[in-house]
Amino acid sequence: MEMFKASQFIATGFAVLLAATLAVACNSSTDPESQPETPPGVDARYFPAPEHDLERISSDAQDFYVQTVLEGLSVPWGLAFLPDDRVLITERAGSIHIVENGELREQPLDNVPQVHAHGQGGMLDIVLHPDYENNGWIYITYSRPDGSGGSNTALSRMRLDGYAFTDVELLFSGEPTSNRRHHFGSRIVFDDDGYVYFSIGDRGMMATAQDLSTHAGVVIRLHDDGRVPSDNPFADPANLPEGQSEARPEIYAWGSRNIQGMQLHPETREVWSHEHGPRGGDEINIIRPALNYGWPEITHGINYDGSIITPDTAREGMEQPLLHWTPSIAPSGMAFVTGDRYPGWKNSLMVGTLAPRYLHRVELDGERVVAQEELLPGIGRVRDVRMAPDGYLYVAAENPGIIYRLIPAE
């Protein structure tokens, strides 16, 4: 049987993109001789098993099927899978929705923090506390209004009681606020020691990413209750880098433009991130304490109008990315492939893309990139990618908002 080769997509115009989009949406190949197949037994923990045969898709290393498991959303930004088989989904417009028995509840959940949804801001990431089954804490990042038209990225936690949140606590709010509409970040990660990390973008004021007196272009590290760890790199003023007169003690790493993907590596247990460059220069980095990732003093990108931001792609005291993309793929969401369901994708990092609208696979050997592949061309603006506790990869695309499940073929 002829199989759709997902890794060889090159954008050749609207007609090709439209054809690819329709092929994915209908779970059918553009090859008229291709026949849909029945996927192997599917765990229906969060969403029902497929009700009809699906197109078998071939990648360089793993055959799979794509199932549309949820529709009716707009811009689904983050997914969290609850132990009771329900799913929480943030919508950038400011709401949080719940999926029960595989279906989207019509009404969003009540008592969420107030959100200033404008531009790239809104309700952003959502993550369960590592000890959720005992403490019930759910963490979110969002653009929090300052009461005068501005906002910045904030971190709150809360508990779910029925269809409403309770015990809502603001743990952190970035400063200064701004009325700018872009670069809020934001992703949340817990490490094995219970610290919570989350990202804030440079808010479109690029120079501030090199100013440690602001929360711009940084990764924040806190205790799970919002306290600042005493061993944060700048908690002691004596640790100020050269040229800095003060530093915010919450900052763990700095010099980033706009991190919208962050995950804990399944083996090394370090925090990995990806971030948007300007026109070119999207990056993958490993987040380590006190390191300066260089934006905007070094970059592989240029301004959108073609002008030069900096002539330098490297500078002493600033980190080089593990990988960079030019032209930009506009990365959003990322997940390491774990478990045994996808043997061909072992040691791969899945990255969503907003501009070319596909799923990008990065194959790794330790910290070395050994292969890259473009999957599911035309699937939409991929906002989030998650490995769920059921062992499947889920992909959230926006406008329209759809959740897909990738089912491995035998």
Image (cartoon, rainbow, N blue to C red):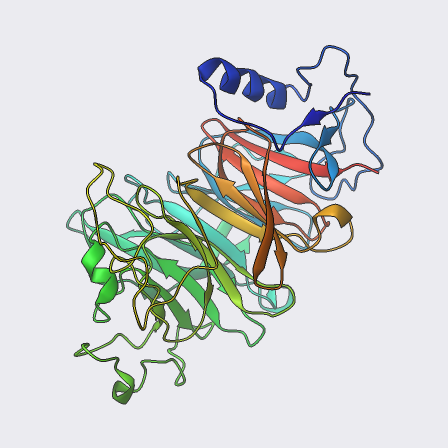
Vertical order, 205 against 107 (above or below): below
Which quadrant would the C terminus be assigned to in this image? top right
Q: Position of residue 224 (x, y in %)?
A: 47, 72
**How many numbered marks are there?**
0
- State the residue in front, 171 or 386: 386
Residue 168 appears in the picture as rendered? no
Q: Position of residue 46 (x, y in %)?
A: 69, 42
- State the residue in front, 294 or 147: 294
Q: Position of residue 289 (x, y in %)?
A: 41, 75
* Residue at the top extreme, as displayed: 32
Q: Position of residue 331 (x, y in %)?
A: 45, 44
Vertical order, 243 against 350 (above or below): below
Horizontally, residue 374 falls left or right of residue 347, namely left
- State the residue in front, 353 or 303: 303
Residue 164 appears in the picture as rendered? yes
Horizontally, residue 185 falls left or right of residue 360, namely left
Q: Residue at point 46% right, 45% down?
A: 332
Vertical order, 219 against 6 (above or below): below
Which quadrant would the N terminus be assigned to in this image? top right
For residue 153, which quarter of the picture? Answer: bottom left
Vertical order, 262 against 247 (above or below): above
- State the residue in front, 90 or 201: 201
